Image (tube, rainbow, N blue to C red):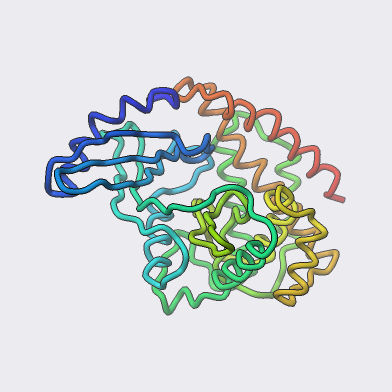
Amino acid sequence: MSANDINDYIQPLNGYFSDKLGQEARVTQLNRLAEGHSREMLHCFVETDDQQLQYVLRVEQDGIFGTSSAEEFRIMGALHKLDFPVARVLWLETGKDLLGEPFFVMEYVDGEPEFPVGETLNEFLSVLSRLHNLDWQKAGIEFDLKPSNVNEATHMQIDRWANIYRSASSLPIPLLEEGAAWLHHHAPTDGPFGIVHGDPGPGNLVHQNGKILALTDFEFCHLGHPFEDFVFCADMRGPRSLPTEGWIELYSDQLGVRLTEEEWHYWQIFNLFKGACANTTSLTVFCGGKNPAPNLAIVGTAIHQSFLRQLSGLIG
């Protein structure tokens, strides 16, 4: 099912929600929340005889970015049980029979998705730091990759993204091969080890009145080094709310986190490498014809090339 015909979802979802809720249910409205790349995000209004409900569906898009709805569902469910600010997930469908892709359903969180500023950014950093420092083992959070320390975790992530790009590309991309080798050679041998969001910052959170109601988009979540998140936010997603230098100052003032030039350099390269590898999958899906959304072509060409150019300038 293409990205342009979400109304075709309504009829199968009527039966789906009726089954899940144990009574007749009707989808009265279905809106696309955002033109997401790895997931299609749909805001679903459901009506029964005695109540009106709102849900969000996260629908895969033919394996874009090589991430797993099942893992994301599992992580979000465990975090919600810890009263971490994340939407409560309800139902996971790993098959493709209903909507043509795996998907899961979560509760709708009513708040502001726009890029936050001011004190909301301080609150966001507190929430992100809490994520990094959660005792994931005690909480029983299960990850697909199970490293035992930060060095092993970093090598696993490098191999993960290299393998995703290799599966999506018919020919080797020399700069990505060189990037993988460089990252393996310079990988941190020690340091903090915990839950990494993988795509944190403005645009991937819901807030209201200075409070973070929910972090969103956990498809890149994994075990690793928290500096990956700090550099990603300041360099790639965060500048829409605050310049990179402002993020660096916040990290220092609020969290006492100060990266050396070498650490900053490493995680810049890592995030560009991860992004360039992931973006190859977008072009594969677009060219396959199943999802002709223009944003997928842009991600797989222009943005991919931009990441490669930046990567080329940093690897020395």
- In front of the other: 191 or 299: 299
Residue 220 at x, y percent in the picture: 54, 53
Residue at the (63%, 31%) spot, across then down: 300
- In front of the other: 173 or 199: 199
Residue 137 sits in quarter:
bottom left
Residue at the (47%, 73%) spot, across then down: 136
Residue 291 lies left or right of residue 227; in this view the side is left
Residue at the (60%, 41%) spot, across then down: 278
Question: Is residue 200 at all visible to an observer of this figure?
Answer: yes
Residue 192 sits in quarter:
bottom right
Residue 179 at x, y percent in the picture: 74, 48
Count of marks placed on residues: 0
- Residue 59 vs 215, above or below: the answer is above
- In front of the other: 34 or 62: 34
- In front of the other: 129 or 166: 129
Residue 266 at x, y percent in the picture: 77, 59
Question: Is residue 152 at all visible to an observer of this figure?
Answer: no
Residue 75 lies left or right of residue 313; in this view the side is left
Can you say which quadrant of the picture contains the N terminus? top left
Residue at the (40%, 48%) spot, across then down: 69
Residue 290 at x, y percent in the picture: 44, 23
